Image: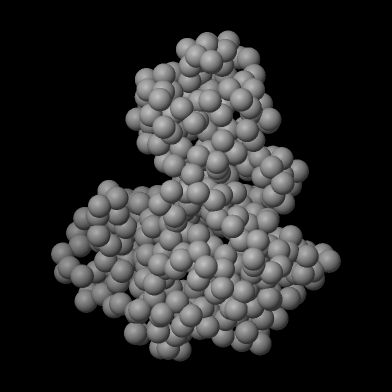
Amino acid sequence: MRMVDLIEKKRDGKELTAEEINFIIEGYTKDQIPDYQVSAWTMAVFFRDMTERERADLTMAMVHSGDTIDLSEIKGVKVDKHSTGGVGDTTTLVLAPLVAALDIPIAKMSGRGLGHTGGTIDKLEAIEGFHVELSNEQFVDQVNRHKIAVIGQSGNLTPADKKLYALRDVTGTVNSIPLIASSIMSKKIAAGSDAIVLDVKTGAGAFMKTAEEAKQLAEAMVQIGNNVGRKTMAVISDMSQPLGYAIGNALEVKEAIETLQGKGPKDLEELCLALGRQMVFLAKKATSLEEAEQMLKEVIHNGKALEKFKEFIASQGGDPSVVDHPEKLPQAAYRIEVPAKTDGIVAEIVADEIGTAAMLLGAGRATKDSSIDLAVGLMLNKKIGDSIKAGESLVTIHANRDQVADVVEKIHSNIRITDHAVAPVLVHDIVRQ
C-alpha cells in the first residue's frame, strides 16, 4: 500500500477502506508517513468529505492508536458529557454531581483550557487540595464508591489525534466536519463510557458560528458514536453570549455551587437540566425525559446534589467546606465596576471577545505554557434583554492589577446597548440518530 495512491483516491472523491484508513493513521503515528503526505490527504478530505462509514473507521483508528480506558469494572451505565467549548461554560461542575446524585456513575476525563478561561481541571483546582492525579484502579474504585471522579487526560490517549490536530492547525484543515467529529469522538470513545451526551455550541463564542454548522457537526458525531456502539445524542446550545454570569475559574466554581443550591443563573440551570435529563434517560434511570428532569430537580431541591459535590471534592483531596464558605476560594485583590455609558437594553454581548477580556486578566492561557490566575475574571451584571441605566454596572472586573484600561475597553467594545433587544433561544435543537 502506498500513501500517494490513497491521497489520489481521496482527491478523486473515492471511498477509502477501513484497512486503508488504518494504514494512514498507524503509519503517521509511528512516523512512517511524513507530514507533507498527511497534509495532502487532510486537504483532500477537507474538499471531498468522508462517508459515514469512513468517519467511523477514522475515529476507531485514532482510538486504537494509543491507550483506552477500561471502565468495565464500574457498575451501571457510564454516561459522559462533552461540550465543544464556550465562555463561562460551567456545565460539567454542575452536571457531574447532579447526575451522580441519582446513582449514575460519572467517570469523567477532562482537560485544561487553552483560551478564554481554564478547563474543568483548572476550575476544580481552584478548590484547595483538589487533585486529579489518580491511577486507573483508583479512578474506577472512586466511581464505584462515590459515583463520581474526574481525572486529567491520559498522556497516551489518542496520540494520532494529537498529532493530526497539530498538523491540521497549520495547514488550514481544522474546519472540516469529518476531521473535527472524529477528533472529538475518538477521545470520548477511548475514555470508555457507554453513552455520550454532546453539547454542541453555536454563536459568537463557539467554534461553529452558525446553527447550521453546529447541526452538521452534531449529526456527524452522533452518527459516529452510534455506529461504533455508543449510545450518543447531541444538544445544540447557544453561545452568542457567555453562559451564566461568571467568567473565570474560582468565580465559575462559586456559580456552580449556587446552581446546585437552586440559586444559579437561569440559563446555566436550564442547560444543565437539558443535558442532564438526556444523561439520566440514556443511563436507563428514567422511562421518559420528563421523569428524568423531575428527578434532577428533586436532588437539587432536597440538597442531595450539593452533598454529592462535597463528597466528590473530599474524595479527591479538596476542602469541601468551600461549598458552604465560597469565600475560601481564591479571591482577586481588586473589584472594578464597568459602568454603562447610556440607558437602554443590552442587545449584544460578543462572547468570544468578552472571554478574551477575561484572558487578558490571566483567567485563561494564551499558550499551553501560560500560567492561570485562578482568582481573576469577570462577573456579568446584565445579560441580553436586560435594561440598564447610564452609570449602572455592566460588568464587575475581578483583577490582581489595578490598571485594567485594556480590559474595560474590550468590554465596552463588545457589549452593545440599544433601545430594544430579544434574548437568544438557549437550546436550538436536539440531534439523535
Q: Residue 280, located in which quarter of the rendered image? A: bottom right
Residue drawn 20% across and 70% down? 400
Residue drawn 30% across and 77% down? 330
Q: Is residue 380 left or right of residue 277?
A: left
Res. 38 visible in picture: yes
**Tally of marks:** 0
Farthest residue to the right: give it.
287
Instruction: Examine the rendered structure and indicate whether residue 33 appears above or below residue 368.
Output: above
Residue drawn 40% across and 52% down? 155
x and y percent of residue 278 in the render?
A: 71, 60
x and y percent of residue 336 in the render?
A: 26, 71
Instruction: Examine the rendered structure and indicate whether residue 223 appears above or below residue 105.
Output: above
Between 189 and 184, which is closer to the camera in this rendering? 189
Q: Is residue 348 left or right of residue 51?
A: left
x and y percent of residue 317 in the render?
A: 41, 80
Res. 250 visible in picture: no
Residue drawn 41% across and 23% down? 33
Between 341 and 175, which is closer to the camera in this rendering? 175
The colour scheme used here is: one colour
Instruction: Examine the rendered structure and indicate whether residue 364 appears above or below residue 6.
Output: below
Q: Is residue 373 left or right of residue 346?
A: left
Q: Is residue 3 left or right of residue 55?
A: left
Between 395 and 11, which is closer to the camera in this rendering? 11
Quarter of the figure with the C terminus: top right
x and y percent of residue 430 in the render?
A: 70, 50
